[in-house]
Amino acid sequence: QVQLQESGPGLVQPSETLSLTCAVSGYSISSDYYWGWIRQPPGKGLEWIGSFYHGGSPYSSPSLKSRVTISLDTSKNQFSLKLSSATAADTAVYYCARHRWGSSGNFDYWGQGTPVTVSS
Amino acid sequence: SYVLTQPPSVSLAPGETARITCGGSNIGRKSVHWYQQRPGQAPVLVIHYDSDRPSGIPERFSGSNSGNTATLTISRVEAGDEADYYCQVWDTSSDHYFVFGPGTRVTVL
């Protein structure tokens, strides 16, 4: 069974970098899937942040691209998100998920989500 | 960027049929995926590729897609179906790639 688990600080100072990790079990992140991040601000809908494929290039939402870094650590079977210059607008529950690319790109396995608040 | 529209809410009694629409320009040409998100939980994929159910999803969940509207249908609604439902498509027109609808809150009276 594929399982994903997010971890990271629940509180981030404004202008600092938000850093999260997603540990994957039951499937190798080096295999044939993309690994992505989605967030959900309080009371709002889902927003795709970005994704990475082992051996490929990362992709991210145009609205966040300048601040997003996604990387994979195949030795630990985990991947990470860094979002720089955090503001209150980045306060959200952050999910990691597995997906395929293209029109078949649905998110079939999700982590439980981790809440992040950006505040001083 | 590609925009999806959904009704904000749907309310119905147990046993009734819920039909949740997802509107988008020529959405019938795209594959639509649907997620259920119960309060405080992560989303769960309930329909992929317009009308296919992933393993473990009850047959009461079905989907269709044509023209400018995709529809998620939940037959014989139960209290446990109370959740937010999101549609999602892949779109390359503006590099946003993964586009989610705003979500529909299903309330079982």
Image: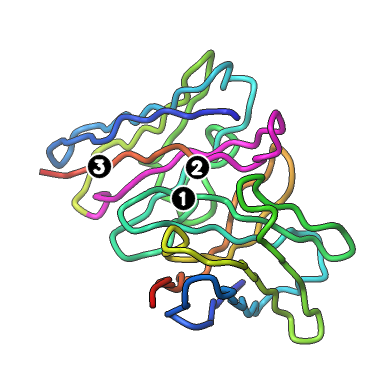
Residue at x 52% of width, y 23% of height: B65
Task: Work out whether residue B53 or residue A21 is closer to the camera in this orientation and state it.
Answer: A21
Tell if the residue under mark 3 belongs to the same chain as the one under mark 1: no
* Whole-percent x, y for residue A51 in the image: 70, 57
* Whole-percent x, y for residue A119 in the image: 39, 73
Estimate how packed mark 3 is, as few (under 14), some (14 to 19) or many (20 or more) residues with alpha carbons within 10 Å.
many
Query: At label 1, which amino acid type do we have?
Result: Leu
Distance of label 3 from label 2 (alpha carbons)? 16 Å
Which mark, by number, is residue B47?
2
Q: Which residue is mark 1?
A: A46
Tell if the residue under mark 1 belongs to the same chain as the one under mark 2: no
Decide if residue B69 is on the left or right side of residue A56.
left
Distance of label 1 from label 2 (alpha carbons)? 17 Å
> What chain letter is assigned to the residue under label 1?
A
Magenta region, residue range: B80-99
Task: Work out whether residue B50 or residue A17 is closer to the camera in this orientation and state it.
Answer: A17
Q: Is residue A90 above or below residue A103?
A: below
Residue B10 is inside the magenta segment: no
Q: Are marks 1 and 2 in contact (CB under 8 Å)?
A: no
Residue at x 55% of width, y 17% of height: B25
Q: Is residue A28 above or below residue B2?
A: below
- The kind of secondary structure the magenta stretch mainly shows is strand
Kindly indicate the quadrant of the structure image that contains residue B48. top right
Q: Which residue is mark 3?
A: B106
- The residue tagged with tag 2: helix, strand or loop? strand
Residue at x 87% of width, y 59% of height: A56
